[in-house]
Image (cartoon, rainbow, N blue to C red):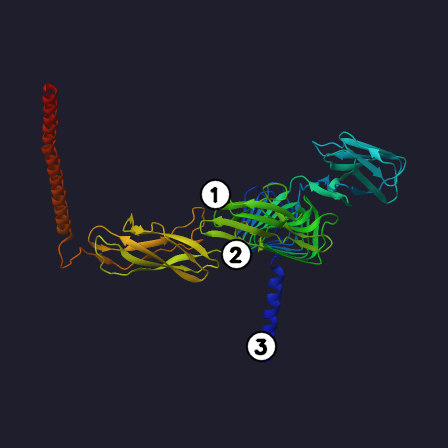
């Protein structure tokens, strides 16, 4: 370095350092506050604690990064079309679902009540949620006696409390039925210590109440969570969600819906749900879990549920049997309607059906239902099939071996047929289907039904083969004409093209008046009529002549009779 320039460089460095020391530090930011809707249109970071209680939209192409705790009010609706990155941050509902409902038919449910901060005598007060009561259930504190509960509150009097805590065990009374929904448990001594029921550990319960806010990840949007927490949210994922050591608390079931939807979670997991599963997916969304903790007990990690399915048959009157439907693997007979459809019933009615369960013990059950014993009677034949898999899509096209018949050729032997005579025609049927069919055909001459004999000819056409139909075609009026023939499709068909049905045309033929060298047929007919007339006249004249001869002989018979009478009179005179 030049010794003359080094002092200058040192001065510049010192000046820059002093300027940087004077620049203000980067400020932490949080939600903007207020009640106006928030629209994130560019990359934004919230690293300061704050709260929101309004519409929040993250637009496509923008990222909102949250590394702090954000309190979320009940008016909040978060729509993620871009990216929501929870990098150590949390979304915490200010009014999460806080009641619990007994959900353990045939068993017991329990809650751990901590008493490490309690001393002396007092009471445990069990308070039902508004609109419910405790009737029909019993409760046991620790190793104590079972007590019958009634009304909206039940009090257990104690002389002392254990140093750490104990279990409250609830059970439905034999012969009773009802809903046990708890709002809170209170410990009353010199003061009152309230515990929200949903804050207590235990098993045999699901959450009851309304979610604290809604969070939707749209198709094309994404949620990324690392060491994060989402509490009290009604979650719908139609895009992608990826989590690492992060938690959904009081947010179950998390809904994952759509062919573009996916939920990939490693570590962390789920804590408390409003149903008996932490995640609810449809039949096509992608799920992946590694080292995930679920809510435990009878609550499964996930369920796949599909809406009422519609089976689409080629036509009406198809009989079939569904086997292995739903978790109970039911057998259901059915028949297609006049519209060619049949509905697959849900588990508890006409709506949704569970087709997969990721159980809390790590095992997975997947429905493998089939459509069996299909039998469909048609005018072309009876078609059957067994063992078609029932997929998990909402609309199922039921395909089984059918014929597919079309007209491949219409051949008129004479390209110039004569009026008054029928032309010989050969119609070739082609069956590209998998099974044979007995197919009648119909033909049209222009826009009118053709004069053919027989009227509705038919042929048996084997699978992947052809067959000929011979017929006679009559026509009136000279000139060009084309014969169009097509298969006569069964009336119960509802699916276009199910049986093929393509028509075929003959080449153009020219119908001509007969031009023979002999006598005109009309003249011949007149001559024949004339000859017949002459013969009839001659015959009539001959009959009249014979009658005249008979009449001429009758008087002679009369004179002979009179002569005999005269002779008899002469004899008398003598």
Residue pointed to by mark 1: 338
Residue pointed to by mark 2: 61
Q: Residues within 10 Å of mark 1 (few under 14, many from 20)?
A: some
**Residue under the image location 52 percent in, 47 percent down:** 318
Marks 3 and 2 sit apart, C-alpha to C-alpha, by 49 Å
44 sits to left or right of 163: left
Marks 2 and 1 sit apart, C-alpha to C-alpha, by 49 Å
In depth, the one of 8 and 135 nearer the eye is 135
Q: Secondary structure at mark 1?
A: loop
Is residue 232 at all visible to an observer of this figure?
yes
Q: Position of residue 255 (x, y in %)?
A: 61, 49
**Residue under the image location 61 percent in, 41 percent down:** 349
Q: Secondary structure at mark 2?
A: loop
Residue pointed to by mark 3: 5
355 sits to left or right of 57: right
Q: Position of residue 147 (x, y in %)?
A: 84, 34
Q: Residues within 10 Å of mark 2 (few under 14, many from 20)?
A: some
In depth, the one of 146 and 8 nearer the eye is 146
2 sits to left or right of 209: left
């Amino acid at each position: 370095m030049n010794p003359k320039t080094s002092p200058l460089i040192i001065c510049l460095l010192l000046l820059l350092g002093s300027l940087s020391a004077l620049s203000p530090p980067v400020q932490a930011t949080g939600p903007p506050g207020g009640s106006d809707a928030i629209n994130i249109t560019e990359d934004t970071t919230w690293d300061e604690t704050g709260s929101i209680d309004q519409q929040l939209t993250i637009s496509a192409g923008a990222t909102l990064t949250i590394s702090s705790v954000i309190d979320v009010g009940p008016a909040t609706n978060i729509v993620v079309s871009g990216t929501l990155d929870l990098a150590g941050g949390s979304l915490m509902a200010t009014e999460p679902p806080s009641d619990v409902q007994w959900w353990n038919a045939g068993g017991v449910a329990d809650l751990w009540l901590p008493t490490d901060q309690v001393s002396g005598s007092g009471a445990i007060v069990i308070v039902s949620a508004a609109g419910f009561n405790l009737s029909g259930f019993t409760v046991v504190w620790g190793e104590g006696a079972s007590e019958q509960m009634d009304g909206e509150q039940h009090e257990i009097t104690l002389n002392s409390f254990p140093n750490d805590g104990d279990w409250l065990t609830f059970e439905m009374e034999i012969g009773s039925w009802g809903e046990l929904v708890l709002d809170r448990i209170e410990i009353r001594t010199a003061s009152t210590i309230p515990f929200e029921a949903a804050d207590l550990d235990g098993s045999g319960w699901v959450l009851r109440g309304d979610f604290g806010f809604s969070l939707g990840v749209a198709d094309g949007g994404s949620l990324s969570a690392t060491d994060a927490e989402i509490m009290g949210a009604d979650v719908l994922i139609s895009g992608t969600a990826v989590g690492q050591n992060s938690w959904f608390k009081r947010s179950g079931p998390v809904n994952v819906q759509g062919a573009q939807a996916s939920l990939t979670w490693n570590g962390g997991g789920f804590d408390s749900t409003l149903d008996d599963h932490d995640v609810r997916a449809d039949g096509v969304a992608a799920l992946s879990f590694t080292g995930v903790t679920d809510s435990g007990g009878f609550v499964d990690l996930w369920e796949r549920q599909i809406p009422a399915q519609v089976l689409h048959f080629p036509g009406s009157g198809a009989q079939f049997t569904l086997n292995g439907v739903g978790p109970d693997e039911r057998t259901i007979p059915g028949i297609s309607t006049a519209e060619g459809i049949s509905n697959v019933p849900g588990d508890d009615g006409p709506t949704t059906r569970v087709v997969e369960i990721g159980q809390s013990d790590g095992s997975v059950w997947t429905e493998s239902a089939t459509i069996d014993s299909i039998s469909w009677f048609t005018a072309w034949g009876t078609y059957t099939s067994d063992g078609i898999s029932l997929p998990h899509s909402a609309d199922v096209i039921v395909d089984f071996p059918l014929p597919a018949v079309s007209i491949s050729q219409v051949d008129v032997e004479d390209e110039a047929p004569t009026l008054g005579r029928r032309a010989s025609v050969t119609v070739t049927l082609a069956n590209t289907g998998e099974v044979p069919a007995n197919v009648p055909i119909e033909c049209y001459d222009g826009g009118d039904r053709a004069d053919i004999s027989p009227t509705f000819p038919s042929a048996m056409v084997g699978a992947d083969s052809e067959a000929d139909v011979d017929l006679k075609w009559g026509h009136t009026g000279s000139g060009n004409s084309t014969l169009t023939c097509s298969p006569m499709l069964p009336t119960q068909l509802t699916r276009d093209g199910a049986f093929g049905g393509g028509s075929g045309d003959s080449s153009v033929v020219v119908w001509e008046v007969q031009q023979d060298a002999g006598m005109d047929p009309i003249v011949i007919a007149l001559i024949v009529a004339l000859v017949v007339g002459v013969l009839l006249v001659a015959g009539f004249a001959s009959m009249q002549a014979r009658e005249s001869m008979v009449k001429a002989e009758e008087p002679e018979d009369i004179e002979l009779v009179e002569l005999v009478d005269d002779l008899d009179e002469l004899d008398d005179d003598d």
